[in-house]
């Protein structure tokens, strides 16, 4: 396993950001530093949110250039951010911005698998009408944002809401179904939101995944698609001193 670290201050253009988010919202955050995720004007946080999108775009570019089959941005996969507002600690939707950018180039199709405990509502809302994007989310049905029901059928949108207390077996069953859908869709790139908050000890969900179970789920994805470029984003996780870093690291390695 070779690890290359990339450091950059890449800032996506306003034009690109506004293909996904409204101009007024982009202004509020980048220019005014105003966002309901924090109190009062915080220009430095607006700049940080903008840079976060750039980090995901850089990771994607490494895949497009053929420099690696797995690129990781632990600060990425801000899957709750909507077109005109932030939500669930997510300011800009880096996955949607990056997918939009890639599909304007030579990329034919992109799949997004989200195993964070919370439904990837923002990513789904922003990409569900794109004919060349597939979104798949397995999540805790009992918590925020309360969306992502199994009967919400739409073009290439797949949701597996799990009951409270669901564990590794249910996660693997959902991911196995997703693998079949991704294989049928035949994407050029897979985005993977590897939220750590499904772990049994995370305070913000009622799921009971183990670290081994989450790692095994990601291993099954890589085993199914050994040559498919995968972009890993950290998404959620609320045990920053111990469990979350381990979950993120092990899932990133599993995707490699």
Image (tube, rainbow, N blue to C red):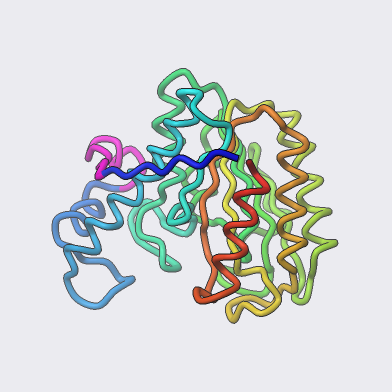
Above or below, 199 against 173 in this view is below
Spot the residue most to the top.
106
- List x then y, in percent, for residue 132: 56, 28
Above or below, 225 against 47 in this view is above
Residue depicted at 64% across the width and 54% down the height:
251
| Residue 204 falls within the magenta-colored stretch | no
- List x then y, in percent, for residue 95: 46, 45
- Camera-nearest residue between 200 and 86: 200
- Camera-nearest residue between 251 and 177: 251
Image quadrant for the C terminus?
A: top right
Residue depicted at 72% across the width and 32% down the height:
225
Instruction: Answer with left or right where residue 249 lies relative to residue 172.
Output: left
Residue depicted at 41% across the width and 51% down the height:
93
Q: Quadrant of residue 86?
A: bottom left
Spot the residue most to the front.
2
| Residue 12 falls within the magenta-colored stretch | yes
Above or below, 188 against 251 in this view is above
Image quadrant for the N terminus?
A: top right
Instruction: Answer with left or right where residue 203 lies relative to residue 82.
Output: right
Question: Main structural element of the magenta stretch: helix, strand or loop?
Answer: loop
Q: Quadrant of residue 29?
A: bottom left
Instruction: Answer with left or right where residue 237 lies relative to residue 33.
Output: right
Residue depicted at 33% across the width and 47% down the height:
21
Magenta residues span 9-21
Above or below, 153 against 132 in this view is below
- List x then y, in percent, for residue 236: 53, 64
């Amino acid at each position: 396993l070779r690890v290359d670290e990339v450091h950059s201050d890449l800032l996506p253009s306003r034009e690109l950001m506004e293909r996904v988010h409204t101009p007024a919202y982009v202004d509020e955050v980048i220019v005014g530093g105003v966002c309901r995720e924090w109190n009062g004007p915080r220009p430095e946080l607006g700049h940080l949110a903008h840079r976060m999108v750039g980090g995901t775009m850089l990771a994607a570019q490494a895949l497009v250039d053929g420099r690696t089959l797995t690129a990781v941005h632990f600060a990425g996969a801000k899957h709750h951010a909507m077109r005109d507002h932030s939500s669930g600690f997510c300011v800009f939707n880096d996955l949607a911005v990056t997918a939009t950018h890639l599909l304007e180039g030579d990329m034919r199709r992109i799949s997004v698998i989200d195993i964070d405990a919370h439904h990837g509502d923002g990513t789904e809302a922003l990409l569900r009408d794109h004919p060349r994007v597939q979104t798949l989310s397995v999540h805790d049905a009992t918590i925020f944002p309360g969306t992502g029901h199994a009967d919400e059928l739409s073009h290439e949108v797949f949701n597996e809401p799990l009951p409270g207390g669901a564990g590794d077996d249910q996660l693997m069953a959902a991911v196995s179904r997703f693998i079949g859908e991704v294989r049928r869709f035949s994407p050029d790139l897979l985005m993977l939101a590897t939220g750590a908050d499904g772990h049994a000890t995370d305070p913000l969900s009622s799921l009971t995944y183990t670290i081994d179970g989450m790692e095994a789920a990601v291993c099954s994805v890589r085993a199914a698609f050994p040559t498919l470029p995968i972009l890993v984003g950290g998404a959620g996780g609320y045990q920053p001193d111990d469990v979350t870093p381990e979950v993120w690291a092990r899932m990133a390695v599993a995707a490699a």
